[in-house]
Amino acid sequence: MKNIEALSKEERVLRVMRAVLIDVIRDTTTKPGLRHPLSERTRDEIRQCLELITARQVEFAEAAGAPMKERPMFADQPRKSAVVAFNHSRPSPAATDKD
């Protein structure tokens, strides 16, 4: 991914608009069975905007010779990597000096 300063104005606008639209989706998503605060038409228009933004970002990536490898990640989707906790506690020097 390019450094933010290296992006064209259009690429920066697309990136910010995509982030804003995704935030709107996250902020307005309701639990199943509840009425969504946005109309169906507005939600469809947001989807269309995201599709157009993504298509243009793919064009930019392909023109630069670096196809986009980003894929959506869903909350219930298993992750390919796992976090492993290490226990870094060591006995204090005072505890080992008593022997």
Image: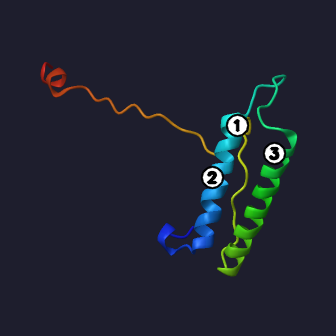
Would you say the residues marked 2 and 3 are in contact, meaning their CB atoms lie under 8 Å apart? no
Mark 3 vs mark 1: give the one in front: 3
- Element under disc 3: helix
* Furthest residue in direction top, as rendered: 98
Q: Which residue is mark 1?
A: 75
Q: Residue at x 71, y 76 (%)?
A: 62
Left or right side of 16 for 49: right
Chain-order first, disc 3 or disc 1 = 3
- Residue type at numbered disc 3: Thr
Mark 2 Cα-neighbour bin, 10 Å: few <14, some 14–19, many ≥20: few
| 64 lies above or below 14 | below
- Residue type at numbered disc 2: Ala
Q: Position of residue 5 (x, y in %)?
A: 47, 71
Mark 1 vs mark 2: give the one in front: 2
Left or right side of 96 for 19: right
Q: Quadrant of the N terminus?
A: bottom right
- Residue type at numbered disc 1: Ala
Gap in angstroms between the C-alphas marked 1 and 2:
17 Å
Q: Nearer the viewer, residue 76 or 98?
A: 76
Gap in angstroms between the C-alphas marked 3 and 1:
23 Å
Chain-order first, disc 1 or disc 2 = 2
Mark 2 vs mark 3: give the one in front: 3
